Amino acid sequence: MKGSTRSGSGGALVYLRTMAVFALVWTGVAWWTDNSILLPTPLAVAQAAIDLAKSLELFEHAAISLGRMVVSITIASAIAIPLGLAMGLSTRLERIVDPTIEILRPISGIAWIPLALFIFGIGNTLPVFIMTYAAFFPIVVGTVGGVRAVDRRLIDAARTMGVPQRTIVTRVVVPAALPSLLVALRLGVALSWTAVVAAELIGAPSGLGYAVEWYRELLATPQVMSFIAMIGVIGYLCDAFVRELNRRFTPWMPATR
């Protein structure tokens, strides 16, 4: 217990020291630049963040963007996980579907924004579509890989005992593939959250990306950096949440201990 406490306090000290050095370097560069529009000081950004938090504007845009990400991850998972399970269990289906996935996967979701603007217009649908597109591919590929890695002897043993195919999938394949699936979900969340900013910059009337672009046009750099910092904080918290799910549902995996 003492060792873990010392390790935790040591990690906190290292983090605080690193952030202090970063703040000092930032302050020095800001003073040397002497242009608050180009690079404001950390104190100016902190004050802007406090003002935005007091007016609830910071949290309102953050809640909107986070809600869009939750919707997009739900849609992407609802499509990608069953498809990935089916592709992992059926070589024929994988041969049919995999070429289409591999053609679309290298195309960034941002590349679809101009076309999506014509189809969906400005609103909630466009960023949700872009985020769903970004999250879909890592989830489906990770699910296929997880299913392919399942020990075939477990499946053969279940079939030998007369276990129905649906039960084999839910009781054998899914638990065995769960670590890979959760890693894929983590990647999907990260890519989805990265895409939200680009999608909201152009095709949304609200959200963190919209706020960044709005204050950029007003040359309010401290506010812009406050929203950028909020994007990073929420991204970190989302990743920590998925890692916690990984620890809870796969405690037997060494990487999650």
Image: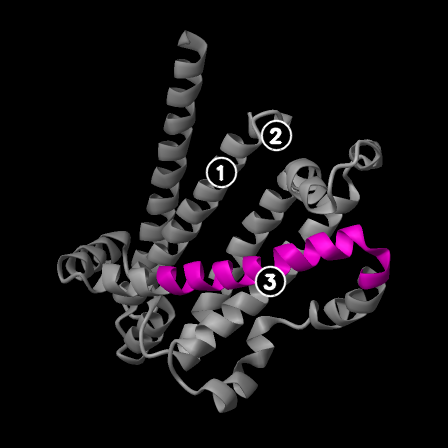
Residue 152 visible in the picture:
yes
- Could you tell me which secondary element the residue under label 3 belongs to? helix
Q: Nearer the viewer, mark 3 or mark 1?
A: 3
Q: Quadrant of residue 71?
A: bottom left
Tell me the chief SS of the magenta region.
helix
Looking at the rendered image, the quarter that the C terminus falls into is: top right
Q: Nearer the viewer, mark 2 or mark 3?
A: 3
| Residue at left offset 43%, top offset 52% | 235
| Residue at left offset 79%, top offset 36% | 162
Q: Which residue is mark 1?
A: 245
| Residue at left offset 71%, top offset 40% | 168
Q: Which residue is mark 3?
A: 79
Q: Quadrant of residue 61?
A: bottom left
Q: Is residue 107 left or right of residue 187?
A: right
Percent coordinates x, y for residue 137 in the rendering: 65, 61
Of residue 169 and residue 1, the one placed in the foreground of this image is 169
- Could you tell me which secondary element the residue under label 1 belongs to? helix
Measured Cα–Cα span from mark 2 to mark 3: 27 Å
Looking at the rendered image, the quarter that the N terminus falls into is: top left
The numbered dot on residue 96 is none
Measured Cα–Cα span from mark 3 to mark 1: 20 Å
Which is nearer the N-term, disc 1 or disc 2? Answer: 1
Q: Amino acid at mark 3?
A: Ile
